[in-house]
Image (cartoon, rainbow, N blue to C red):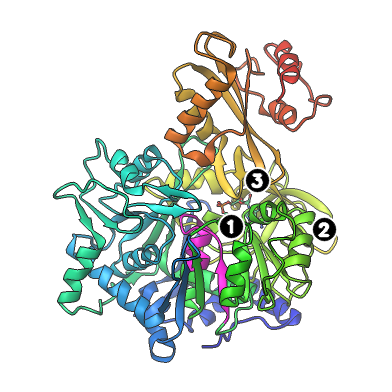
Amino acid sequence: MSYPYQIKSLEQYHADYKRSVDDPAAFWSAIAEHFTWKKKWETTLNWNFTEPRVEWFKGAKLNITENCLDRHLEKSGDMPAMIWEPNDPDEHHRILTYRRLYEKVCQFSHVLKNNGVKKGDRVCIYMGMIPELAVAVLACARVGAIHSVVFGGFSAQSIADRLYDAQAEFIVTCDGAYRGQKDIPLKSVIDDALIGNRIVKRVIVATRTRTPVSMIKGRDVWWEEEINKVETMGLHDFPAEEMDADDPLFILYTSGSTGKPKGVVHTCAGYMLFTNYTFVNVFQYEPGDIFFCTADIGWITGHSYIIYGPLSAGATSLMFEGVPTYPDASRFWKIIDKFKVNILYTAPTAIRSLMGFGLGPVHGHDLSSLKVLGTVGEPINEEAWHWYDEHIGKKRCPIVDTWWQTETGGILISNIAGITPSKPSYATLPMPGVQPILVDESGKEIEGNSVSGNLCIKAPWPSTIKTTYGDHERCRTNYFATYPNLYFTGDGALRDENGFYRITGRVDDVLNVSGHRIGTAEVENAINMHASVVESAVVGYPHDIKGQGIYAFVIYQGSHAQNTHGTADLIRKDIHQTVTRIIGAIAKPDKIQFVSGLPKTRSGKIMRRILRKIAEGETENLGDTSTLLDPGVVEEIKNGKL
Ligand code: PRX
């Protein structure tokens, strides 16, 4: 399979970009001709950012799994679709050819159907990084059910909230998951999440860790037993459900500035096109290349660049169950050597953490198969960029710094490997079809170069967020109402003298901790659940490895930590425990400072700007504090800084 829409020169990039902006409908419909449709579209694009309503390929019918699987069978049935590397390097890896993956997806589609799953039903998937996770995702897409994958690090409470929000009736999970040293009892977390839940009808449990699990009669079934039933009936195919272009494909929950995660919805046709197009172009994927994206499928990066982008392109996608530092910090390099990986796509936080181990773990591994390196999820600092370039890419491999979001479905701003220029810490230029602009606080466009502002997008791209599940108004107010007729990203950016974009970070109350997106309000809500906490305020601060760390200012009952319930450290542990229970360990504050009051305006609003500066170590220029209800509190907080 070759990709007629792959950009092969800088001139072509500029020409394609111009065509994509001059006539988006013509541009994308020409690309869409290279996909498999059950029925072609009537109109390519209808849109209006006010409602918002963005409709791509209206009238078309398709199933994304026919594009990810069926269409490759004839020519590439024996090609590896997925290579799976287990957590434990002594366990055997697995290779699923396109034919084998197709069969497994079809079989599990039968299992879903036998268990009552129908088109439009919501299926929550809470699994470790095993091939069955990819199979479950694709089987949902094949039967037309809407998958909602929840990252394995989220707590029972978070799952319960997501199940309720999506009104999910089905769950696919595992007995447990291996992650480095840990063995996470996923099914038992699900059992906790289901206490009091009257909506979930069926839980399908795959075996991985053999951790003892309690299977509830009438509700819980084993993956393997269900598959056996299908196998004995000799079922190897499953007719793909006919989906409308804009039928929901999945929900993925992500944090915003409110306390409640939003269910971002992506639909079938546009998402398929754009993940495929960006995969093929940004990474300059060539048939036969081994593509290794280190993300978890619980995040958008895993959805778009482990599953849908690569598979729709007939690529070989490497999926890794473990973590970069287990059994030691050479694991990524060993995997690259073992499978002769050509393209590595990872997060700056992983690079920074591996940098910390020095060059020892890198030495002795053959990395010469690498052609392209990528980063995603957070700004990459120049030091990490150069380390990646010198020691991993050996200065031979272009690094693509890909900026995008859960809401954008695929990469919006990035250099194109070896085709458009790169610049350390810059995402650089927009992909064809993407029209970024910078605006000031009032929404006025900031034109010209060498400027900075809030990053917005002024026209739809094929995988524009469709809605937030069950609450379209929330989608409008969050993304389309801040600035009229623009999609607001929540990020700040600067544009250099060449028109290259550098993303400077969130301008709202969203943190990016190790590439994980966490709302400060969510963490505050969780901390405030602790019986003895009166109030809290959470801000981010620069962290060498995580990018951002979580700094919590907490008013504890009795005003100070030295109270009857124990020492400050014990109370901190209690708060950690509470946050772990309510959200998950990923949201545990790195620093907890006990304070007697918070800087508030007379109207009661917390002045986070001041707290942010203190957390960042700034003690002098805190700005105007005269409007504070009690300016004295600032001194106390400054003096107690951790
Ligand atoms: O702040 C930006 C940051 O991650 C946010 C999106 O997070 P999420 O929806 O979890 O998706 C992450 C993976 C696509 C953005 O608003 N971000 C993402 N990529 C970059 C980035 N910041 C700087 N440079 C990037 N390449």
Q: Which residue is mark 2?
A: 496
Q: What residue is drawn where x is 76% and y is 57%?
A: 425
Residue 174 seen: yes
Say few, some or many: other residues with alpha carbon within 10 Å of mark 2 (under 14 / 14 to 19 / 20 or more): some
Looking at the picture, which amino acid does disc 1 mark? Pro
Is residue 213 on the magenta stretch? Answer: no
Say few, some or many: other residues with alpha carbon within 10 Å of mark 3 (under 14 / 14 to 19 / 20 or more): many
Looking at the picture, which amino acid does disc 2 mark? Asp
Query: In the rendered image of this protein, does residue 482 appear above or below residue 379?
Result: above
Q: Is residue 25 left or right of residue 388?
A: left
Say few, some or many: other residues with alpha carbon within 10 Å of mark 1 (under 14 / 14 to 19 / 20 or more): many
Query: In the rendered image of this protein, does residue 116 appear above or below residue 624?
Result: below
Q: Which residues are magenta?
A: 289-306
Q: Which residue is mark 3?
A: 546
Is residue 299 on the magenta stretch? Answer: yes
Q: What residue is drawn where x is 53% and y is 44%?
A: 478
Q: Position of residue 249 (x, y in %)?
A: 38, 62
Q: Which residue is mark 1?
A: 324
In the rendered image, the residue lying farthest to the bottom is: 75
CA–CA distance in space, label 3 to label 1: 14 Å
Looking at the picture, which amino acid does disc 3 mark? Lys
Query: In the rendered image of this protein, does residue 532 appear above or below residue 642?
Result: above
Residue 199 picture quarter: top left
Q: Position of residue 305 (x, y in %)?
A: 53, 67
CA–CA distance in space, label 2 to label 3: 26 Å
In this view, the residue in front, 32 or 172, is: 172
User: Which of marks 3 and 2 precedes in the sequence?
Assistant: 2
